[in-house]
Amino acid sequence: MDTSLQPGLILEGRYGVVSELSVGGTNRVYEGRQTNLGQRVIIKTLSEVYEDPSQAKQQIEQVSLEARVLAALSHPNLLAVHDCFLHEGFPIMVCEFVEGRPLAAVAEMAPRQISAKRVLAWADQLLDVLSYLHAREPSIIVRDLRPSNIFLGQDGRLRVVDFSLVKRMADRGKGTQEIVRGVGTDGYAPMEQMAYGPTGPATDLYALGATLYFLLTKIHPPPAGGRAIAVRDPLVDARTLNDTVDDALWTALLELMAIRPQNRPQSALEARELLFPKPPIAAGAEPKVRHCVDCAVKLEPQMRQGVEIDWCHRCGGLWLDRDELERLIELAVEDHGSDSLSNAPTQVLNTTAAGSVHLGDMELPATSRVWQFLREVWSNSGFSNQERT
């Protein structure tokens, strides 16, 4: 059955189809508009409906389950569901619209591998939402957590956007209820899911580890089946691809992506303790405070466009970590509407014409949002242009 929706189509008299955003193995996703209120929405439908009536019925039941599950949840890292109905025999789900891009695209457009500090900040959000889902009664298992199903909003918040393979746990310890036997995505689904075995919280934690691995390396993990039968694990050591990955993080990733589910953390709390081990605190120790390397004064945190940087009130210097620069790079890309930073026009900065600005080993166009952001901080620093360096 053709499930495509044409732009201009009005569904249920109140949801207008604007344009197709993506087509995946499971879903078609459209930008839509709620005609009554003028709000942008996401419209999801199946990418195809099986000809076999019993299989088609199962597909429709799965979409209905996805809608019911999401509609009953309230969490900042989940999409809000507005509506669910049938259109010409196939299911439609209407969700909250999120301005942003999937983490898969964020990683691919990054000029180099993303810093471990930033990836762990995302892991913190994902562990929070997995903890929330797994604590429901019955537990909710996503079963398709991967970079393309996680959106990074312009507010810096992640949203898990695809629950097409979601399952509810049956009785505790007996695995998930069966409706549609979706096996997940190669590289992100563990062996028990690929083999249609019982799935549970450890299934999502494998997918979390695989997602973090991709974000750190820009390499999709090898399929779990291939890893299980290989004489030597084909998973490339992330430490050789990203110099911000330390031994502790690599060990944590290997535990999350263990082939046997019993060898993985069994809860999001255990995974958090693995990824964020608490260092011993010496008696009388004070928290670390960053100081300007030139003036030795305490740096003051400044929030601009969702990015925290440190500012020295004495010399006006700005200090940014690698992960902060990465976010600024993304803002610059969004500003120019492309994945290239090299074609932006120049502009006059103070009295000097500059085509680009060097930040460490990154070169940015002078008109980018990154540079404009830095100028905004400088303009509020209380120093004249001649005094700023």
Image (tube, grey):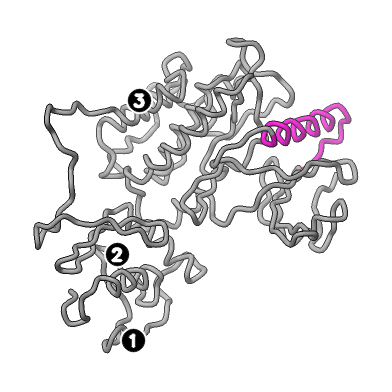
Give the alpha-carbon distance from disc 2 to disc 1, as whole Å. 20 Å
Q: Are marks 2 and 3 in contact (CB under 8 Å)?
A: no
Location of residue 343 in the rendering, given as x and y in whole percent from the top left corner: 43, 76
Q: Is residue 218 left or right of residue 7?
A: left
Location of residue 239 in the rendering, given as x and y in whole percent from the top left corner: 28, 38
Q: Which mark is residue 362?
A: 2
At label 1, the amino acid type is Val
At label 3, the amino acid type is Glu
Q: Quadrant of the N terminus?
A: top right
Which of discs 2 and 1 lies nearer the camera? The answer is 1
Q: Main secondary structure of the magenta part?
A: helix
Q: Is residue 209 visible?
A: yes
Residue at the limit of the structure toward the bottom, as seen here: 351
Q: Residue at x 52, y 27 (%)?
A: 204
Q: Is residue 54 one of those drawn in magenta?
A: yes
Q: Quadrant of the C terminus?
A: bottom left
Q: Secondary structure under badge 1?
A: strand
Mark 3: give few (<14), some (14-19) or many (20+) Cα within 10 Å: few
**Magenta stretch?**
47-71
Q: Residue at x 48, y 36 (%)?
A: 126
Mark 1: give few (<14), some (14-19) or many (20+) Cα within 10 Å: few
Examine the rendered structure and indicate whether residue 234 appears above or below residue 383.
above
Location of residue 317 in the rendering, given as x and y in whole percent from the top left corner: 19, 66
Q: Is residue 314 left or right of residue 80?
A: left
Q: Secondary structure under badge 3?
A: helix
Using the image as rendered, state which of residue 25 and residue 376 is in the foreground. Answer: 376
At label 2, the amino acid type is Met
The residue tagged 3 is 273
The residue tagged 1 is 348
